């Protein structure tokens, strides 16, 4: 019984209300959109496709302590920036890490998918060169590249192109570190001020309704993935958890039943052969359950977890957009405070200090200045001059922060549309694989049980 989990999906949607709809007739991880008369500036545009493939894991330097696994990375593409429509190269896991880390740095507004976790038990036990682990890692790396190449900007980046076709990848890595594609960010007034103004508990004062809806959609999507992962883990543990002593291993139960029926056949000499056939059918069905777990349920659980980490990367972009808006709001407040202090000093100098109405804070500052001997007009004029310079700097910083926030918001809208497309493509693939696995299992099960029915029916029962 599922109990409380039965209706949990009633409130869960896979779609984001603000994401555009795509024509499902387009095939492939990317496509060139038709040029409409009135194009939406927030709608992503593909210039072509890039279909990746990761296969043929090979253990390199096998007899040394520096052994590692390399993978054949290839692709099919019609993008003009590639020198060949079928680029290929061999890459190791560290190369994927470099690619991902630098794409995150070079494209902070893009949803760059996460790589599979390297800190696995296999690295401790030494099983990272086992065929099972290498195949699982190969599939995860394939999915990583698939998500990258579904992105219209990342698929055309210089680093991604070099990753697929460069024969001197180590040179490319060194050059990229030494000469990044964008200018190195230098510490600005925004960086210096925001560190002291912002903290982990700051919130956007004027939230944008569009991004609130997006965040709500992400919450519901991740809730659905978490519930699905929990339910399928429960199904797996009850079907084939590999621990018969737990009493919830259905494959083990069918195996035990087969042994019991076979033992019964030795006692019933007249129907020994039919009972042996029935026992064999139970064993085959037990094997089918185990096979279904290995080929359908386990890959589904891996894909669900991977999709959840992909959604976390999307959430990080939304959070970074909020941070850009928060920078602008906090700098605007800081500018207002500095301007008010400058106006207060001007009022003191002109003899109208009582009309400023700045409250106890201004009064305390005046008292402190008096104690320090800095309450004469000469000190106030010098302080006003410094405040005027700071106000000019802050005005420039606020303008820059506002432009950055708006640009980042526009880019985030495009990113959400791209993520929606990638999410729908992955959901279709994942659920199709689940459906095909279930169909294959039940077809094979039906064949096994249909073969035993005539044998059972031939048993004569004398009344």
Image (cartoon, rainbow, N blue to C red):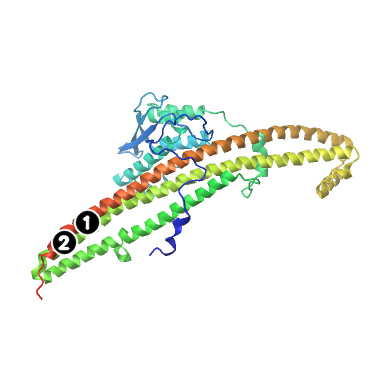
Mark linked to residue 152: none
Query: Residue 142, relative to residue 82: is it above or below?
Result: below
Q: Is residue 69 left or right of residue 418?
A: left
Q: Position of residue 121 (x, y in %)?
A: 38, 50
Between 46 and 232, the one nearer to me in the picture = 46
Q: Position of residue 120 (x, y in %)?
A: 39, 48
Q: Is residue 327 left or right of residue 173?
A: right
Q: Quadrant of residue 289?
A: bottom left
Between 392 and 28, the one nearer to me in the picture = 28
Indicate the secondary structure of the residue bearing disc 1: helix
Q: Position of residue 196 (x, y in %)?
A: 67, 43
Looking at this rendering, what residue extends furthest in the bottom direction?
463
Indicate the secondary structure of the residue bearing disc 2: helix
Q: Position of residue 454 (x, y in %)?
A: 13, 61
Q: Is residue 262 visible in the rendered structure shown here?
A: yes
Residue in the picture at 55% in, 47% down: 213
Mark 1 and mark 2 lie on one chain; the one further toward the N terminus is 1
**Residue with the mark numbered 1:** 446
The image quadrant where one finds the N terminus is bottom left
**Residue with the mark numbered 2:** 453
């Amino acid at each position: 019984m599922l109990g409380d989990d039965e209706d949990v999906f009633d409130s869960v949607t896979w779609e984001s209300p603000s994401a555009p709809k795509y024509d499902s007739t387009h095939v492939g991880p990317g496509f060139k959109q038709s040029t409409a008369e009135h194009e939406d500036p927030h709608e992503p545009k593909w210039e072509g496709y890039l279909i990746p493939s990761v296969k043929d894991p090979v253990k390199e330097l096998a007899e040394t302590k520096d052994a590692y696994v390399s993978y054949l990375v290839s692709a099919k593409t019609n993008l003009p920036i590639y020198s060949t429509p079928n680029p290929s190269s061999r890459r190791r896991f560290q190369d994927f890490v470099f690619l991902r880390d630098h794409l995150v740095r070079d494209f902070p507004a893009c949803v760059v998918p996460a790589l599979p976790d390297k800190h696995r038990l296999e690295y401790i036990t030494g099983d990272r060169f086992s065929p099972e682990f290498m195949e699982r890692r190969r599939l995860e790396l394939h999915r990583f590249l698939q998500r990258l190449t579904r992105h219209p900007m990342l698929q055309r980046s210089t680093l991604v192109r070099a990753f697929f076709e460069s024969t001197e990848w180590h040179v490319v890595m060194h050059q990229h570190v030494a000469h990044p594609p964008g200018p190195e960010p230098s510490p600005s007034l925004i960086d210096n001020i925001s560190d002291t103004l912002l903290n982990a508990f700051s919130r956007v004062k004027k939230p944008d309704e569009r991004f609130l809806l997006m965040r709500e959609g992400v919450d519901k999507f991740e809730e659905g993935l978490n519930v699905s992962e929990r339910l399928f883990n429960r199904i797996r543990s009850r079907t084939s958890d590999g621990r018969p002593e737990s009493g919830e291993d259905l494959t083990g139960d069918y195996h035990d039943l087969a042994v019991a029926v076979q033992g019964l056949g030795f006692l019933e000499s007249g129907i020994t052969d039919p009972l042996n056939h029935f026992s064999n059918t139970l064993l085959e069905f037990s094997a089918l359950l185990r096979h279904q777990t290995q080929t359908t349920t386990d890959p589904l659980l891996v894909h669900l977890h991977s999709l959840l980490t992909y959604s976390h990367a999307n959430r990080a972009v939304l959070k970074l957009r909020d941070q850009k808006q928060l920078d602008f709001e906090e700098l605007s407040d800081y500018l207002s405070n500095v301007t008010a202090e400058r106006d207060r000093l001007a009022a003191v100098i002109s003899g109208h200090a009582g009309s400023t109405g700045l409250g106890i804070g201004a009064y305390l500052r005046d008292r402190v200045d008096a104690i320090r001997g800095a309450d004469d007009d000469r000190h106030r004029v010098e302080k006003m001059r410094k405040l005027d310079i700071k106000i000019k700097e802050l005005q420039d910083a606020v303008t820059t922060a506002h432009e950055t926030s708006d640009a980042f918001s526009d880019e985030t809208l495009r990113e959400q549309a791209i993520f929606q497309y990638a999410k729908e493509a992955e959901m279709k693939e994942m659920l199709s694989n689940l459906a095909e696995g279930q169909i294959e299992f039940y077809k094979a099960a039906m064949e096994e049980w249909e073969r035993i029915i005539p044998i059972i029916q031939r048993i004569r029962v004398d009344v």
